[in-house]
């Protein structure tokens, strides 16, 4: 179906997301180090990116800006991964930045798949 890049410093979370999306037929790669996210995107050429908001070193905002500075990824749908305790103004701010969506952690499998499917490019 689609190539999806998961950028999350939590290895267990990245594995679970990868397994759920892989079982849905997607080709999924994970990147645990936010500093290598743009390089990983360049090598994999994802159609959708799931990006953790809170990570050590570069946070999700910084990774997002670096991705958007690369012409190859300026229009790639990006959904932020964030914990449920984030205030609504932060969620609105992510959309203002240009994020396509956000997915709360812990996530519901059905909701994750529904949200990712909405981000997929149409044929």
Image: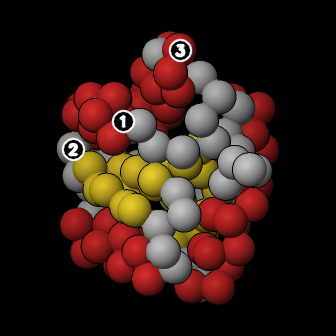
Residue nearer the viewer, 123 or 109: 123
* Rendered view: 84 above or below 16: above
Answer few, some or many: residues within 10 Å of disc 1's Cα (few below 14, many 20 plus, some between 14 and 19).
Answer: many
Q: Which residue is denoted by mark 3 in the rendering?
A: 71
| Disc on the earlier residue, 3 or 1 | 1
Asked which secondary structure carries label 2, the reply is loop
Question: Looking at the picture, how far across and down is residue 122, in whole percent?
Answer: 75, 50
Which label belongs to residue 41?
A: 1
User: Which quadrant is home to the N terminus?
Assistant: bottom right
Answer with left or right where residue 12 lies relative to residue 51. Answer: left
Q: Is residue 102 above or below residue 24?
A: above
Q: Position of residue 20 (x, y in %)?
A: 45, 80
Q: Which mark is residue 33?
A: 2
What's the residue at 50%, 21% (across, down)? 72
Foreground pick, 121 / 12: 121
Q: Residue at x 41, y 75 (%)?
A: 22
Q: Earlier in the sequence, mark 2 or mark 3?
A: 2
Question: Where residue 96 sits in the image (x, y, percent)?
Answer: 76, 32
Q: Quadrant of residue 19?
A: bottom left
Q: Is residue 96 above or below residue 53?
A: above
- Can residue 106 be seen at all in this image of the molecule? no
Q: Residue at x 54, y 45 (%)?
A: 47
Q: Earlier in the sequence, mark 1 or mark 2?
A: 2
Q: Are marks 2 and 3 in contact (CB under 8 Å)?
A: no
């Amino acid at each position: 179906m689609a190539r999806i890049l998961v950028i999350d410093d939590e290895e267990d979370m990245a594995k679970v997301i990868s397994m759920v999306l892989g079982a849905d037929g997607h080709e999924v790669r994970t990147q645990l180090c936010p500093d290598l996210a743009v390089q990983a995107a360049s090598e994999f050429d994802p159609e959708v990116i799931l990006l953790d908001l809170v990570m050590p070193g570069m946070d999700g905002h910084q990774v997002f800006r670096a991705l958007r500075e690369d012409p190859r990824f300026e229009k790639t749908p990006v959904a932020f991964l964030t914990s449920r305790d984030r205030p609504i103004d932060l969620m609105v701010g992510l959309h203002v930045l240009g994020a396509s969506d956000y997915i709360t952690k812990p996530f519901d499998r059905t909701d994750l798949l529904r949200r990712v499917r909405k981000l997929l490019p149409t044929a």
